[in-house]
Amino acid sequence: MNFELKTLSLSAAVAYKCDLLVLLVPEGFQPQSDALSALIAGALKAGDLETKPGKLLSLYAPAGITARRLLLLGCGKGSAHAVRQAVQALGAASKAPSIKRVALVFAMDCEAGAVGAAVRTIADASYVYTATKSKAEPRALSRVTVGVADAGAVRSEFATASALVAGIEYAREWANRPANHATPTLVGDAANALSKHAGIQCKLHGPAQVAKLGMGAFLAVAQGSEQPLRFVELRYDGAARSQAPVVLVGKGITFDTGGISLKPAAEMDEMKFDMGGAASVLGVFRALAELRPAINVVGLIPACENMPDGRAVKPGDVVTSMSGQTIEILNTDAEGRLVLCDALTYAARFKPAAVIDIATLTGACVVALGGLRSGLFASDDELAGQLIAAGDAAQDPCWRMPLDDEYAEGLKSNFADLANVAGRAGGAITAAKFLQSFVGDVPWAHLDIAGTAWKSG
């Protein structure tokens, strides 16, 4: 989708040519001497329009307005959060086949973050999945014009949001694909395609290279599948090589049956989303290609399936991780931490400033936090604070969870250095403690996105 930013007053919006004109109307709206202001003021006075975020009034071919369709959206006090709620109400209107060009105009001065929230939300609202549908109509909406009182004042925020949309849609597309259309090989291809952008490099490791690296935990998860694993290594160099990179590690289980510890059949189809962390990393690099910030970033994706083949790893098996630590696999459905632990060990070779892993890791995190906030675990207070602030700014919030050493007691094993599960109690925390055993002293954070990576159905 193409976005453009314009200085566009209500008086100018009267004659603006588009398929749908959307006006964001705040509390305390001050009308001017133009047809749109008069229309808004009349609707407010009559009580037909409320300024509460998400309230809307739709009009067709209003007199004196060039646009055939007009949508008045209440946006409260105009904060980023309120604008996001308002634009979400567009819903089906943004997906109509006849809507190819939309103008979204702020009928007030923009608060910080409001323009970015509007851009991201209209992209989200209009997204259409088509990859595996034979007769699906692609998204008709092709251009969105964002109109504000002073385009120059918000140009940087607008550019950042447009770049983020490119990354978000890349992540969304790969997370949504069925497992047979997003195999480890195809995920590797998606990563390799990013290397066509300046500043991005990709290296793909196959089973032989992973075995040579000694990634015994990763190999154990993959051994039950006919699909060969891929270990993806992405690199973005936007700063001097001497600057330590941030390393992002994304869980890439392209389908999770649970292995020998087989999941129930109901809703198992949604385990195609178990590579949401990997999709997130792909999306970050797609956004980096647009943003070109002066930083260095490494992305690591251990991608494989977890299948119950005759060769599959069994409960009670002991494997040796890349770190040299041995692991008793008590539950083969706790496989995400097994592929991540080897990737976290590999991350140390980059001498990173910080390591952040992103994973649909535990159902326990869904029980704890539901679908609103991701679980955040961090060994470093400064890194935790930065991630919390980033989540708040992106309206993708997280909640910091504890990492007390006592939570690791349940991971003790009689047959290995540690077990991969520690019982039901505090399951999201004990999973994080397992991962922490492989990161050393580097500042590290773990985002458990099991509740926030997808919506059921």
Image (cartoon, helix red, strand yellow):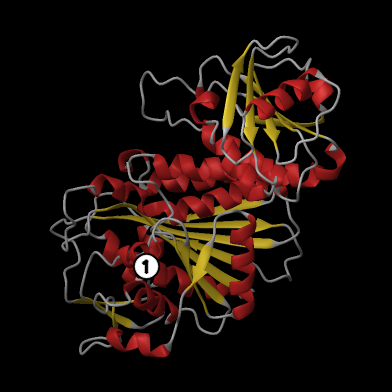
Residue 361 image position (x, y, % from top left) = 37, 64
Residue 444 image position (x, y, % from top left) = 54, 75
Question: Which residue is nearer to you in this view: 197 or 170?
Answer: 170
Farthest residue, direction left: 310
Q: Residue 111, can we see it? A: yes
The relative height of residue 132 versus residue 179 in the rendered view (above or below) is above
- Residue 297 falls in which quadrant of the image? bottom right
Position of the N terminus, as image quadrant, is top right
> Residue under circle 1?
368
Question: Which residue is nearer to you in this view: 168 or 83?
Answer: 83
Q: Residue at x 24, y 87 (%)?
A: 413
Position of the C terminus, as image quadrant, is top left
Q: Residue at x 51, y 16 (%)?
A: 97
Tell me which amino acid carries mark 1: Ala
Question: Which residue is nearer to you in this view: 412 or 14?
Answer: 14
Q: Residue 1, can we see it? A: no
In the visual, does 243 lie left or right of 174?
A: right
